[in-house]
């Protein structure tokens, strides 16, 4: 195996650590991680600044070479307002394929969804525009839809809060379109099992005073069209604390069309991998019991020098090394066959990367 040079030297943005129930796993029989596919990756630049997107792509390729990442799937973050989407990233995908491929909709479909979510009525005109945009995304060569948000908490004043019912009519429509084209939906969904006051650590003024129960809507979305492949993003490291191994196990047991992408490191109790490297055995048991239902999605942000937007992407970019180190640690402590499934084979199948 070629020598590993480690992640690029990026500034670490968080230092608070909760070890809690994350139990250390012996590395006496650790397997080398090998190469892998990252299904959740963001290049963030100003809309239509194609030179900056190319700079970001070259930065991403350096990370990939250092980390043995075979392919990344890039997408716009789930924007509350219209922003860059496939029109800005298609050129780098064409130039750097097959190492870089894309999903679409985070800067187009998601703003339409968030706007429509403020009203229970969706007009025929909005439905038609949404469907036409979704079909155009697939026609452009996108491997699916993402990043789409049903519930997205705000982590800083420069980071938006988004919430629509997971069974909103436009999400049900998107589910049907995704099933028609046999492509997945990358879904950002911070789960709330029952109404709860917003935790003190989520003090961003953009968050509401109370988070409302939302799991029922997700269950209905998953049941709406069993041919729809939903990839629930950020398993193992949610910001609230309800995205637990137990919840993941229950949802996987009920919904055969559900998969998870793993972003393993978080400072919250119950994370898959703690910032110090302790591995949660309950999460590992779920990975072992559902080996074909997990992929790796680091949620890496790469921001080029000329970017003029909000500060949030730069903050998230500073956390890249933490997540990549956690992914290396996770994959190296799985049996080789399971590491290959979760690191590579499942993504290749779900996103049809051979086509």
Image (cartoon, rainbow, N blue to C red):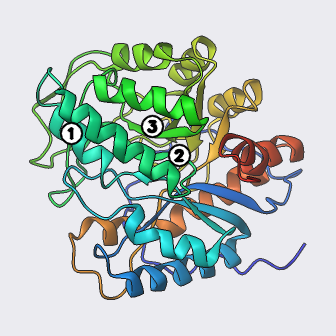
Q: Which circle's residue, 1 or 2, is located before the other in the chain?
A: 1
Eyeballing the image, is 313 above or below 218? below
The N terminus, quarter of image: bottom right
Q: Which circle's residue, 3 or 2, is located before the other in the chain?
A: 2
| Residue located at (30% from left, 45% from top) | 110
Asked which secondary structure carries label 3, the reply is loop
Q: Please name the residue that numbered disc 2 is placed on.
A: 144
Q: Which circle's residue, 1 or 3, is located before the other in the chain?
A: 1
User: Which is more foreground, mark 3 or mark 2?
Assistant: 2
Distance from label 1 to label 2 (Cα)? 19 Å
Eyeballing the image, is 292 above or below 57? above
User: Which is more foreground, mark 1 or mark 2?
Assistant: 2
Q: Please name the residue that numbered disc 3 is placed on.
A: 269
Nearest the eye: 351 or 137: 137
The answer to whether the residues at label 1 and label 3 have Cβ atoms under 8 Å apart is no
| Residue located at (31% from left, 76% from top) | 48
Occupied quadrant, residue 7 = bottom right
Tell me: 210 left or right of 337: left
In the picture, the disc for residue 114 is 1
Distance from label 3 to label 2 (Cα)? 32 Å
């Amino acid at each position: 195996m070629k020598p590993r040079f480690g992640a690029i030297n990026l500034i670490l943005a968080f230092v608070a650590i909760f070890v809690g129930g994350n139990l250390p796993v012996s590395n006496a029989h650790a397997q080398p991680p090998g190469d892998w596919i990252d299904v959740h990756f963001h290049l963030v630049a100003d809309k239509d600044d194609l030179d900056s997107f190319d700079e970001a792509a070259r930065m991403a390729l350096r990370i990939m070479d250092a980390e043995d990442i075979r392919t990344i799937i890039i997408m716009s973050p789930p924007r509350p307002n219209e922003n860059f989407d496939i029109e800005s990233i298609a050129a780098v995908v064409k130039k750097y394929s097959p190492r870089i491929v894309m999903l679409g909709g985070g800067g187009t479909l998601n703003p339409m969804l968030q706007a429509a979510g403020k009203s229970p009525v969706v007009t025929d005109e909005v439905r038609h525009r949404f469907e036409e945009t979704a079909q155009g995304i697939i026609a452009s060569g996108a491997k699916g839809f993402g990043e789409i948000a049903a519930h997205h908490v705000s982590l800083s004043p420069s980071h938006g809060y988004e919430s629509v019912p997971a069974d909103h009519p436009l999400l049900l429509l998107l589910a049907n379109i995704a099933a028609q084209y046999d492509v997945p939906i990358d879904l950002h969904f911070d789960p709330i099992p029952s109404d709860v006051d917003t935790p003190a650590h989520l003090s961003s003024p953009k968050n509401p005073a109370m988070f409302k129960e939302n799991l029922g809507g997700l269950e209905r979305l998953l049941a709406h069209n069993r041919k729809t492949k939903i990839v629930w993003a950020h398993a193992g490291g949610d910001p609230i604390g309800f995205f637990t191994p137990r919840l993941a196990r229950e949802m996987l047991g009920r919904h055969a069309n559900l998969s998870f992408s793993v972003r393993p490191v978080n400072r919250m109790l119950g994370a898959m991998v703690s910032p110090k490297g302790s591995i949660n055995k309950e999460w590992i048991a779920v990975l072992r019991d559902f080996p074909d239902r997990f992929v790796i999605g680091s949620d890496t942000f790469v921001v080029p020098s000329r970017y003029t937007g909000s500060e949030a992407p730069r903050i998230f970019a500073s956390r890249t090394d933490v997540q990549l180190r956690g992914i290396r640690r996770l994959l190296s402590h799985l049996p080789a066959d399971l590491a290959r499934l979760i690191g590579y084979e499942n993504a290749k199948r779900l996103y049809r990367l051979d086509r």
